Amino acid sequence: MKLNIKHLAFFVLSGITLSSCSDDDNELVVEEAPVISNFEFGEGSSHGDEQVAYKGSDIHLEAEIVAEATVSSIALDIHAHDLEVGEGEEEWDFEQIWDDAEYQAINPTFHEHIDVPATAPAGEYHITLTVTDANGNSTEVEGHIHIEDPISISDISIDESVARGNDFHAEFMIEAIHGVHHVVVDIHAHGLTVGAGEVEWDFEQEFEEGLHEETSVEFHEHIDVPATAPVGEYHMLITIEDEEGNTQEIDTHIDVTA
């Protein structure tokens, strides 16, 4: 009888031990959500991180990801709210999910370049980067980037009228991230009566000297108006073109007087 009790105790103890080991083996290991660090974004051509990019160029984005489980996907969202859409512009939003082998790894580095349409409105855009692992855990980081025109014009000073036989003054500052290629001034009129001793006058000239390849430069010219030019209103279009083919215009008028 004593032997049977010993055997029973042995089997009970063995069962408890096996059960304990089984419980340990089945214990769920909870892995932490991915961690995103060093998220930077900016002008693509220089791998900038100043949170500024330009229309018609690209945005450089990079982030380090630490993930206990394999990354399943990386999603990027770029959008703006209430930006004014000007003439020739189109509202722009961007969404993309990367779930290819390059990023389905432990601790991948995210690095992409996103094209910004030349027609995108300038202004502030919201960026969200979301990383999801194989267990469904996800983490996101946010930021803002300013999309700017590759050419900007400021401090415009152009005479509104000029007496024929004299010159008029045109001056403004140019900021061109890709460098100025040239400035073209086109002046013309429609339907003006050409009187006795007068000659129809149109003006078109390319200005490059002192401007070419400059990223920050002042345009300052004096343009002669012939003494024979008919009196009236002339349309003036000044076009600034950069080395990438982007353009910016000043559209104005000037009155030629007697």
Image: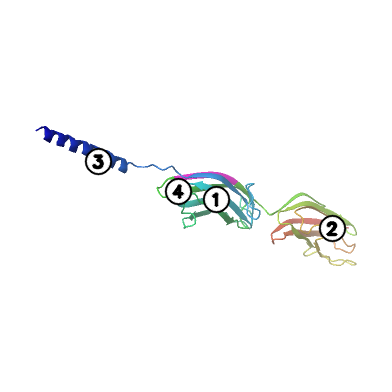
Is residue 168 visible in the rendered image? The answer is yes
Residue 148 at what x, y percent from top left?
65, 51
Tell me the mark number nearer the camera, choosing from 2 and 1.
Answer: 1
Pointer 2 or 1: first along the chain: 1
**Which of disc 3 and disc 4 is earlier in sequence?**
3
Q: Counting residues from the N terminus, which is met first, the one under dot 1 or under dot 3? A: 3
The residue that disc 4 covers is 132
Q: Dot 1 surroundings within 10 Å: few (below 14), some, or many (20 or more)?
A: some
Answer with left or right where residue 213 lies relative to residue 129: right
Highlighted magenta segment, given as a residue range: 138-144
Residue lying at the far left in this picture: please name it: 1
- Judged from this view, the residue extending furthest toward the front is 3
Q: Is residue 84 magenta?
A: no
| Label 4, residues with CA under 10 Å away: few <14, some 14-19, many ≥20 | many
Horizontal and vertical percent position of residue 167: 88, 57
Residue 158 in the image: state x and y as whole percent: 81, 52
Numbered disc 1: secondary structure: strand
Determine if residue 82 is in view.
no
The label shown at residue 18 is 3
Circle 1 residue: 78
Judged from the image, the secondary structure of the residue bearing numbered disc 4 is strand
Residue drawn where x is 55% and y is 50% of the image: 78
Work out whether residue 217 or residue 224 is closer to the camera in this orientation and state it.
Answer: 217
Q: Disc 4 residue type?
A: Thr
| Residue, disc 2 | 256
Dot 3, how many residues are within 10 Å of its Cα: few (below 14), some (14-19), or many (20+)?
Answer: few
Find numbered disc 2 in the image and state the secondary structure of the residue it sits on.
strand
Location of the C terminus by quadrant is bottom right
**In this view of the protein, which residue sits in the foreground, 196 or 170?**
170
Dot label at residue 253: none
Foreground tag (4 vs 3): 3
